[in-house]
């Protein structure tokens, strides 16, 4: 199996939501978006890991950020392998191979992915330092921007790099925030079990669902304004899945079934 195919296989193992729209993209764009997703999934696995204490998470995330910012990094995946090696028995493959994912796309766009991943890793380190202390709506907005809203900005840069597609970047932030808010609702019990509470003080599930819908409406504006392009093909699938997941949660279901996901995707 070549590296490109292997990267897609790892992507398939880590996300049923994003594997399908990424796998449908043209090859060069596929490598780029897959790289971005895998790099960010790699650091997300550190942030959410239930066997790592907060200080270790901070150190690993900051080291990854430093490696990505280092001038010596270009083309050298060993920097990552060295810093992560002591935890190779508990970290998943997607994390251990982050240096490879960072080198997957064209060098004309890869530095933008390094920059976005480095910034996100630093922000995740901050949130680990404060133990994900979210008390207000402003705190929630800051967190969802840190780990997802900024992804909307990165996607806008990728679409512009690939074929000149222009986007509303403010709506792009909402696109990312909305997807993250749905994940927060879905993973509520798991997050609480590891001591992380992303709900502002006094918020119930209905409040977070309202927040998610308001952000996804911005995501819909972002997507609806896209021309007939690979960007549109990509964005409309996770957006539709997010809305459908919220509808399922409102009916008391934990998540969409695999058959429901496949049925929805078949409509595109």
Image (cartoon, helix red, strand yellow):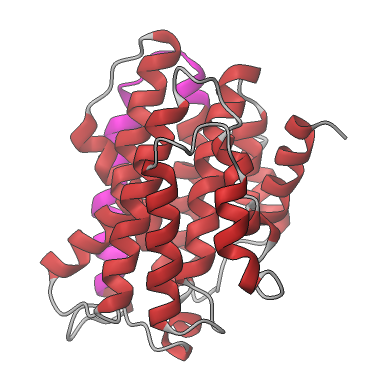
Q: Is residue 182 visible?
A: no
Q: Is residue 158 magenta?
A: no
Q: Is residue 215 left or right of residue 227?
A: left
Q: Position of residue 136 (x, y in %)?
A: 12, 74
Closer to the camera, 94 or 251?
Answer: 94
**Residue at far right of view:** 1
Which residue shows up at 42% across the image and 44% down it?
68
Q: Is residue 111 left or right of residue 126?
A: right
Q: Position of residue 41 (x, y in %)?
A: 53, 54
Q: Is residue 155 left or right of residue 104?
A: left
Rendered image quadrant of residue 254: bottom right
Q: Is residue 173 above or below residue 148?
A: above
Q: Is residue 205 above or below residue 194?
A: above
Q: Main secondary structure of the magenta part?
A: helix
Which residue shows up at 60% across the image and 33% down it?
22
Which residue shows up at 48% across the image and 50% down it?
40
Q: Is residue 31 above or below residue 216?
A: above
Q: Give the extent of the magenta segment.
A: 207-233
Closer to the camera, 242 or 69?
Answer: 69
**Count of marks overlaid on the render:** 0
Q: Is residue 221 magenta?
A: yes
Name the image quarter holding the N terminus. top right
Rendered image quadrant of residue 57: bottom left
Q: Position of residue 84 (x, y in %)?
A: 58, 64
Q: Is residue 129 visible?
A: yes
Name the image quarter holding the C terminus. top right
């Amino acid at each position: 199996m070549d590296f490109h195919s292997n990267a897609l296989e790892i992507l398939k193992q880590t996300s049923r939501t994003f594997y399908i729209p990424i796998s449908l993209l043209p090859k060069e764009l596929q490598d780029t978006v897959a790289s971005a997703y895998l790099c960010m999934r790699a650091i997300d696995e550190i942030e959410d890991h239930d066997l790592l204490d907060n200080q270790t998470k901070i150190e690993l995330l900051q080291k990854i950020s430093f490696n990505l910012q280092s001038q010596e990094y270009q083309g050298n995946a060993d920097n990552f392998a060295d810093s992560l090696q002591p935890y190779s028995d508990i970290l998943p493959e997607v994390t251990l191979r982050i240096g490879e994912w960072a080198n997957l796309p064209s060098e004309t766009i890869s530095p933008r992915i390094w920059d976005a991943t480095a910034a996100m890793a630093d922000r995740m380190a901050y949130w680990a330092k404060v133990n994900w202390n979210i008390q207000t709506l402003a705190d929630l907005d800051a967190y969802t921007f840190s780990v997802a809203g900024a992804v909307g900005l990165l996607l806008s840069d990728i679409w512009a790099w690939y074929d000149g597609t222009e986007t509303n970047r403010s709506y792009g932030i909402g696109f990312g925030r909305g997807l993250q808010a749905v994940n927060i609702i879905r993973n509520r019990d798991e997050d609480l079990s590891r001591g992380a509470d992303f709900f502002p003080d006094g918020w119930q599930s209905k409040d977070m669902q309202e927040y998610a819908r308001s952000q996804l409406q911005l995501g819909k504006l972002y997507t609806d304004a896209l021309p007939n392009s690979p960007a549109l093909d990509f964005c409309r699938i996770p957006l539709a899945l997010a809305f459908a997941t919220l509808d399922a949660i409102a009916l008391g279901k934990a998540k969409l079934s695999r058959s429901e996901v496949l049925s929805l995707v078949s409509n595109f």
